[in-house]
Amino acid sequence: EGDEIKVELKSNVNYEIQIPNVEWVYENKSRALSSYTHYFTIAPNDEYDARSAEIIFVNKENNLSEKVTITQAQKDAILVAKNEYSMEAAGGELKFDVNTNVDFKVETSVDWISPKAESRSMVAKSLSFTIAENTSDESREGRIIISSGESKQEIKVIQAKKAAPAPDPDEEKGTGAEIETGGGI
């Protein structure tokens, strides 16, 4: 999330501060209470990778140095390309990729969607689900929930109602004409 850090030094020599050449760390000189207290602002990390930088305090005359290492966690993410999928009534397999940089768990809101067995920089992970046949005369919907801590992504699955029965090909079709038999030749 970013923050301000306070670094207090005890020194009997003059020193210089070498701030790393990154955009996300900078000294807040207006807050310095003494020449030995330094405040550094750390900007929020909106990237999907962790990052690290070093602030070095140096006295060149005596060849002295001390460093402060700042390590900032990545922005946690769970990303999917679509938030909604439509399925045929017959059910089948639903497969999509999840881009994530965290471990996550998968849940479903209904029992007719079942995860199939298969889960730190951003990695695409393929998830697969078995969608049971919808034998109802009504369409239905359920949700797949992918979560890790505060990060959560929901995907809606809409399944069509069962198809109307196809006409029976063995069933006789009337022609509108009747033929009477019963006489001789």
Image: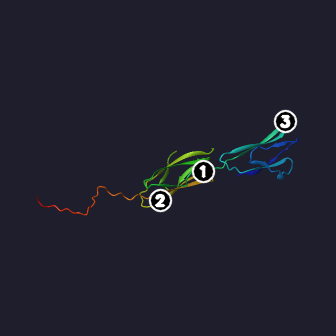
| Along the viewing direction, whichever of 132 and 159 lies nearer the viewer | 159
Q: Residue at x 83, y 53 (%)?
A: 30
User: Is 81 on the left-hand or right-hand side of 162?
Assistant: right
Alpha carbon distance from label 2 to label 3: 73 Å
User: Is 175 on the left-hand or right-hand side of 134?
Assistant: left
Amino acid under label 1?
Ile
Give how far across and how far down residue 122 sits, in percent: 62, 45
Residue 78 numbered mark, or none: 1
In the rendered image, which residue does mark 2 sit on? 140
Give how far across and how far down residue 77 sits, in percent: 62, 50
Amino acid under label 3?
Asn
Alpha carbon distance from label 1 to label 2: 26 Å
Q: Secondary structure at mark 1?
A: strand
In the rendered image, which residue does mark 3 sit on? 63
Give how far across and how far down residue 15 sits, in percent: 85, 42
Q: Residues within 10 Å of mark 3 (few under 14, many from 20)?
A: few
> Who comes first in sequence, dot 2 or dot 3?
3
Q: Is residue 173 above or below residue 130?
A: below
Residue 38 seen anywhere in this rendered image of the structure? yes
User: Is 161 on the left-hand or right-hand side of 119?
Assistant: left
Give how far across and how far down residue 80 sits, in percent: 57, 51
Residue 119 seen anywhere in this rendered image of the structure? no
